[in-house]
């Protein structure tokens, strides 16, 4: 994808730290079958990422954000982050901006489904992929995307996985992430962290802001979004794959979490 030192148009001066040698305000980097670094990194440019195929997790601060197919994530400048995925293929576009407007929107992480107009703008912008030289048309068009983002944004907070600061709970979260397809007994989970059932439930909500049961539901729905993005399974198959006993139970839970109906994704290649 990139050589050992230049990644997405930025120079990795040392592991996870980037210097910016490009003279232009904004540039595009689009690749099919994106390859991920498995460590945190930071750069001075703000970042807009669009997942055209597959799905991607962004690890930022004490949150893990799922960005499914046809969604975008806005990451402010100088914010430590890393990405991960288990999708067989991820087609990803990023746009890196040197300067952004002075508005509250651009100072926070946002995730939202890309509306049709924004997707069309991104597809058009892909023609400048990996061009880091001055281009007036490119500069004006990318600036138009940037200034339009607040009007396109309809944040989907359901795509965030809270990470507890209490290290006692981290093995439990890992256990849930591995065994979400099975019936999870609260007594068994409490034993795993050497807590009473009541203490576990109270501590978990204090640490994450949601109940343990809600966390399990969230993990199941986010996992289902991964499978939906693959385009290989029916909704009925996915329902059972993530621990639901019926399609109706799954679709009701999906809508409760995401506020949208579950639909099998279709593949689209930028270009």
Image (cartoon, rainbow, N blue to C red):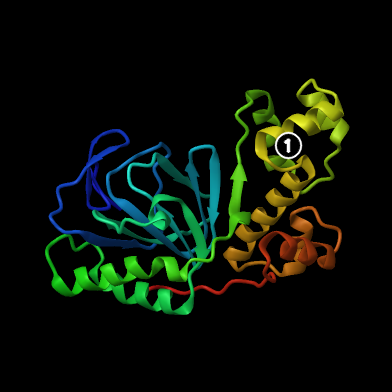
Residue 131 vs 104, above or below: the answer is below
Picture quadrant of residue 166: top right
- Image spot of residue 206 (x, y percent): 70, 33
- For the view shown, which residue lies furthest in the front direction? 103
Q: Residue at x 63, y 65 (%)?
A: 228
- For the view shown, which residue lies furthest in the top direction? 194
- Image spot of residue 191 (x, y percent): 82, 24
Picture quadrant of residue 168: top right
- Image spot of residue 104 (x, y percent): 41, 54
Q: How many marks?
A: 1
- Image spot of residue 194 (x, y percent): 79, 20
State the quadrant of the C terminus: bottom left
| Viewer-proximal residue among 32 and 101 | 101
Q: Residue at x 43, y 39 (%)?
A: 38
- The reply, left or right, for residue 192 in relation to residue 155 is right
Residue 58 vs 110, above or below: the answer is above
Judging from the image, what secondary structure is the residue with disc 1 in? Answer: helix
Residue that carries the numbered disc 1 in the rendered image: 205
- The reply, left or right, for residue 161 in relation to residue 26 is right
User: Looking at the image, can residue 242 be seen?
Assistant: yes
User: Looking at the image, can residue 86 be seen?
Assistant: no
| Viewer-proximal residue among 257 and 202 | 202
- The reply, left or right, for residue 41 in relation to residue 249 is left
Q: Residues within 10 Å of mark 1 (few under 14, many from 20)?
A: some
- The reply, left or right, for residue 206 in relation to residue 121 is right
| Viewer-proximal residue among 174 and 230 | 174
Q: Residue at x 38, y 63 (%)?
A: 32
Residue 97 vs 182, above or below: the answer is below
């Amino acid at each position: 994808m990139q050589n050992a030192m230049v990644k997405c148009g930025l120079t990795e001066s040392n592991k996870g730290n980037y210097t910016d040698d490009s003279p232009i305000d904004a540039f595009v980097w689009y690749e099919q079958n994106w390859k991920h670094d498995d460590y945190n990194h930071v750069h001075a440019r703000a970042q807009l990422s669009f997942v055209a195929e597959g799905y991607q997790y962004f690890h930022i601060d004490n949150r893990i954000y799922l960005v499914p197919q046809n969604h975008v994530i806005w990451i402010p400048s100088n914010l430590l982050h890393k990405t991960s995925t288990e999708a067989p293929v991820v087609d990803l576009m990023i746009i890196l901006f040197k300067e952004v407007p002075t508005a509250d929107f651009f100072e926070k992480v946002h995730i939202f489904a890309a509306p049709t107009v924004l997707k069309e703008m991104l597809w058009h912008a892909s023609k400048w992929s990996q061009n880091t030289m001055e281009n007036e048309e490119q500069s004006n068009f990318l600036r138009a995307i940037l200034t339009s983002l607040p009007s396109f944004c309809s944040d989907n907070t359901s795509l965030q996985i809270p990470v507890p600061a209490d290290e006692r709970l981290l093995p439990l979260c890992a256990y849930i992430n591995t065994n979400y397809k099975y019936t999870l007994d609260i007594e068994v989970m409490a034993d795993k962290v050497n807590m009473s059932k009541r203490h576990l439930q109270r501590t978990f909500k204090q640490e994450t802001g949601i109940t343990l049961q809600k966390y399990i539901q969230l993990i199941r729905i986010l996992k289902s979004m991964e499978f939906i993005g693959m385009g290989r399974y029916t909704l009925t198959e996915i329902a059972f794959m993530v621990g639901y006993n019926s399609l109706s139970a799954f679709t009701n839970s999906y809508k409760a979490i995401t506020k949208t109906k579950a639909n099998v994704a279709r593949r689209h290649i930028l270009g």
